[in-house]
Each structure stands twice: as C-alpha cells, then as structure tokens.
Image: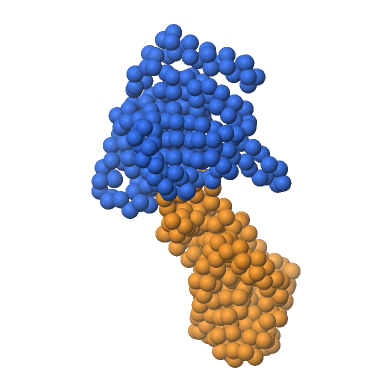
C-alpha cells in the first residue's frame, strides 16, 4: 500500500513543481493545489452535479446488467438469436455513441432519461459479450457429468454454466461501469442543465480551467468507486475459487 | 425406454449388441466402433482394455447414454437406452470436480440434482469420504487437493446415489504410479462392499487384470472385441494376487494377443 501511496504523492508533487518551475499558466495546466482549492470552494455545487451524473450512470449500468445477462444467455441457447440479434448488437457498437445523443434528446427530451439510455447503450455491450464468452467456456465434461445425473437444461445452466461464466460476467460489468459514466457525460454534453458534463461545458465556456480539471478529478473518483463497488459485490457473492485474485484486471477478457 | 424382462431374468446388467459408432468430423467419417457385443452380469467387474484411441471411451459414453450410437443397442438393467441412464455413476479421465464447490458439496452434487433428501445424503457422503481417507478435507476446494485426492472425491461423488452401475473411463490414467495402486485398492474395497456392476475402461493390462472379473480386449480402431478373459480371483482384490503365477499368465496372454495383432 505504501509504495502505491508514495507513487501518487510523487506524481502530484512533480506536477506541482513542474507548473512552478516552467511557469505554466493556470489556464493551460492548473497545479494540483489550484484544483484542490477550487474543489473546496465549489464543493456544494460539485456534489450536486456529481449526484446527477452518478444517478444517471448508476441507473444506466443497473439496466444494462439486468438486460445483458439474460440476453447473453439467450444468444448462447438460441442459434436463431445468435445469428440475428448478435450481429445487430455488434453492428450497433460501430456507431459512435456521441452521434446518437442528439437523436435521444429529440426522442426523450432533456431530462434524466436520454442520459440513462446512452449510459445503458454504451454499458450493455461488454456485459453481453463477456456473458456469451463465459457461458461458452463451460468444459464439456461438466455438462456430460450433469447429463449423466439426469440434470435438466435449466439445472445445467444454473448450477454449472452461470458459475463458469461468473468471473467473465463480472469482468464485463467492471468495464461497463466505466463506460456508463462516459455515456452519462456524453448525454450531458449534448443537452443538460445539470451534471458534471454540463458543469464541464460551463467551466470551459467561462475559461475556469481549474474547475474543469476539478470535474475530471471527480469523474475519475466516480469511475474508481464504481469499479471497486463491482469488485466488492464480486468478492461477496462469488465462492473463493472463482474470484479474480487481483481486482485490477477487469479488462483482461475483452 | 423399452423394458426387456428377458435381460433381467437372464441376469445381465449391461448388454451391448452390435454397437456401431461413426463420427462425422469436418467431412470425414471416422468409424470408432465396428460392431461391439458385450454382456456384463450384475455385480461383475468388467475391464475394457485396448490401445489408446481405439474407441473404448466412446463405448463408455454410449453405455452412459451420453452419445447416440450410429446403430446397435445398449441395454442397462433391461432398459434400452434412449438418453442417459439415470441410475449410473460415472468417473471420467479427469476428476471434473466443480472448482467453486468444496469437497463435500461436490460429492453431494448427485443428491442436489436428483433432489434426494440432504441429511441422509450428507451422512453417506461422509461415510464414503472416510472410506477413501478424505475425512477432514470436506471444506477444502478441489484446487487445494492433490490429483489423487481429487479423483478419490470424484469416485465418492459417482457412488453417492448408490447407482447400480459404475462407469469408469481410465480414471487413474493421470495419476502417478503409487497413487494409482492405492486408488486401485480403494476401488476394489469400496466396490466389493456394495456389489455394483462396473464397466472400467483402461489401457493398462495389469490394472485391468488386477481389478476385473472379466477383461474384454479391444482391437485398434475401428474397434471390435478381440477376446475375453475371465479372472478368477476372489473380490475384493488384494495386492498379493499380483505375485500369483495365474495373474501373470493372464497378463502375458493379453500381451501376446496385443503382439499378435500388431498393437504391441
């Protein structure tokens, strides 16, 4: 833990010194102390907008988890869905999400809904893909064993395949958690009157560069919080042999 | 499943007749079994011995009902199989323990799948684990056990639901020589206290003769039955019989047969 802390402190100290030594103007790159100052000064405003973005991305992530896992199961069990819906999903991922945001605003207005939907739209894909990959990784011997015991297909799904897929699904959710925050921000860039994305736009227009950086810091903290929250849930519900020994390799299966 | 009482009256537990299996793999037809006939009486231990790749594992999968034969029939206790035979226990080449369950829960898997009463099943599981020396390891995960311990747990799992037939597919093939001998003795002891019909697949001549009441020797692929040997030692087998001249005579006869047919 100590070397990790030392590294972070070292980076901030170097950054602080660099802005002093090279006389970097605050509108180009504010020093960590400038960012910290503005974070303290505008803490209530930051908290308010953080809550908006957090709500949007949390609902978007929750929706994507609830829909992606059943969809992944359907893709694995139905050749028809695998050949029709799955290619469509893959194709949908080639669309830049930013391009969809204005359409979502036209369809769903300026409120919470379009941001939630964009967050959902970005977040669900990694979970679907990882669910499909995980379910397909079940060793055939395990299925033979279950069939020889007279297990039904549902028993095989619930007792075996979901379990072998679980580490993959959690890896997918970790990626999705970070994506959901990006989705909410993209939605706020297009049309919003609150949220960290909106705050960034305003700060940018007013040339309040330290505030812009402050929102970036808050966003990173939110991303980390989501990631470790998912890791915590994984730790709590998965039996020990299925847990990933290191929590920071979430993207290893994508 | 159709029921044939004639088999039961004749006292045949496993009956395989004119069994053929052809696999289609990337446009090629591979004939694995070419007309196998086999009869095992209840409570008998039958080893199927053959060179690797001869299709003996395929035979086991067919008897288990996990594969559908190209032609021919498999009857277990008089029932002609059209799916998996529910009253069988299987031990595979690898232990196939579920890594997320501890040893006891792995052994209890058949009870959970078949929804048997858990208290009685737990008692039996503990008894079985005790008989193979795994008492005290119930709460460990498979990854924390040695290969031999894992395969012993797999054997307990196969026996939990008191199956009338036990199907074993080279269960000790991946173990070191010492562990294998120990497991052979364990199996001899466990089975003979419960009198189950066993179909045991192996490529090890000594192992086949040591354990079995009858040894069925198979040819190279496409497999047919070359010859049957009867081994008249009392069960449960003890290691002393490996010093008996009669034991060596049978082993040598089988080796000669393999030489004659170009397998050795």
Looking at the image, is A125 positioned above or below residue B131?
Answer: below
Image spot of residue B49 (x, y percent): 52, 26
Image spot of residue A130 (x, y percent): 58, 61
Image spot of residue A19 (x, y percent): 69, 70
The answer to which of B227 and B6 lies nearer the viewer is B6
Q: In which quadrant of the rendered view does residue A119 lie? A: bottom right
Relative to B196, A9 lies left or right: right
Q: Chain B's shade in the image?
A: blue
Q: Residue at x 36, y 32 (%)?
A: B10
**Direction top: furthest residue:** B245
Q: Residue at x 52, y 12 (%)?
A: B252
The answer to which of B257 and B132 lies nearer the viewer is B257
Image spot of residue B195 (x, y percent): 32, 31
Q: Residue at x 37, y 47 (%)?
A: B110
Relative to B257, B5 lies left or right: left
Tell me, by letter, which chain the rendering colours orange: A
The C terminus of chain A - image quarter: bottom right
Residue B20 visible:
yes
Q: In which quadrant of the rendered view does residue B50 lie? A: top right
């Amino acid at each position: 833990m100590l070397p990790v802390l030392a590294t972070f402190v070292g980076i901030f100290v170097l950054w602080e010194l660099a802005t002093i030594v090279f006389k970097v103007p605050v509108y180009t790159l504010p020093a960590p102390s400038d960012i910290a100052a503005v974070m303290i000064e505008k803490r209530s405003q930051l908290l308010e907008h953080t809550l908006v973005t957090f709500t949007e991305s949390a609902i978007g992530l929750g929706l994507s988890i609830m829909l992606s896992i059943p969809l992944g199961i359907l893709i694995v069990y139905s050749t028809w869905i695998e050949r029709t819906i799955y290619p469509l999903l893959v194709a949908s991922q080639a669309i830049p999400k930013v391009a969809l945001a204005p359409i979502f605003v036209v369809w769903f207005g300026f409120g919470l809904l379009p941001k939630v939907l964009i967050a959902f739209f970005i977040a669900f894909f990694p979970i679907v893909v990882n669910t499909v990959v995980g379910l397909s990784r079940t060793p055939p011997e395990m299925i033979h064993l279950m069939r020889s015991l007279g297990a039904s297909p549902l028993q095989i799904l619930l007792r075996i395949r979901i379990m072998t897929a679980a580490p993959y699904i959690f890896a997918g959710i970790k990626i999705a958690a970070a994506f959901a925050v990006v989705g909410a921000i993209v939605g706020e860039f297009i049309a919003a009157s609150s949220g960290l994305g909106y705050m960034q736009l305003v700060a940018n227009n007013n040339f309040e560069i330290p505030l812009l950086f402050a929102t970036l810091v808050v966003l990173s903290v939110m991303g980390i919080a989501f990631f470790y929250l998912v890791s915590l849930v994984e730790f709590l519900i998965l039996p020990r042999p299925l847990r990933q020994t290191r929590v920071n390799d979430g993207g290893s299966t994508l | 499943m159709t029921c044939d009482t004639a088999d039961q009256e004749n006292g045949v537990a496993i009956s395989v007749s004119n069994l053929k299996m052809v696999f289609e793999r990337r446009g090629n037809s591979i004939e694995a079994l070419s007309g196998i006939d086999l009869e095992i009486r209840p409570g008998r231990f039958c080893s199927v011995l053959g060179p690797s790749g001869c299709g003996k594992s395929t035979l086991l999968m067919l008897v288990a009902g996990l594969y559908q034969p190209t032609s021919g029939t498999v009857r277990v206790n008089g029932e002609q199989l059209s799916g998996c035979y529910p009253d069988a226990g299987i031990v595979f080449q690898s232990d196939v323990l579920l890594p997320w369950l501890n040893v006891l829960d792995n052994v209890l898997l058949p009870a959970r799948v078949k929804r048997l009463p858990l208290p009685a099943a737990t008692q039996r599981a503990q008894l079985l684990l005790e008989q193979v020396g795994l008492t005290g390891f119930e709460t460990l995960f498979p990854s924390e056990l040695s290969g031999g311990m894992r395969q012993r747990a797999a054997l307990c799992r196969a026996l939990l639901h008191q199956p009338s037939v036990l199907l074993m597919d080279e269960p000790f093939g991946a173990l070191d020589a010492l562990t294998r001998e120990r497991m052979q003795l364990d199996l001899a002891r466990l089975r003979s206290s419960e009198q189950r019909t066993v179909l045991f697949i192996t490529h090890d001549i000594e192992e086949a003769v040591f354990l079995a009441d009858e040894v069925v020797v198979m040819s190279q692929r496409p497999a047919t039955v070359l010859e049957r040997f009867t081994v008249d030692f009392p069960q449960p087998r003890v290691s002393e019989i490996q010093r008996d001249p009669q034991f060596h005579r049978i082993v040598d006869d089988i080796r000669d047969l393999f030489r004659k047919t170009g397998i050795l």
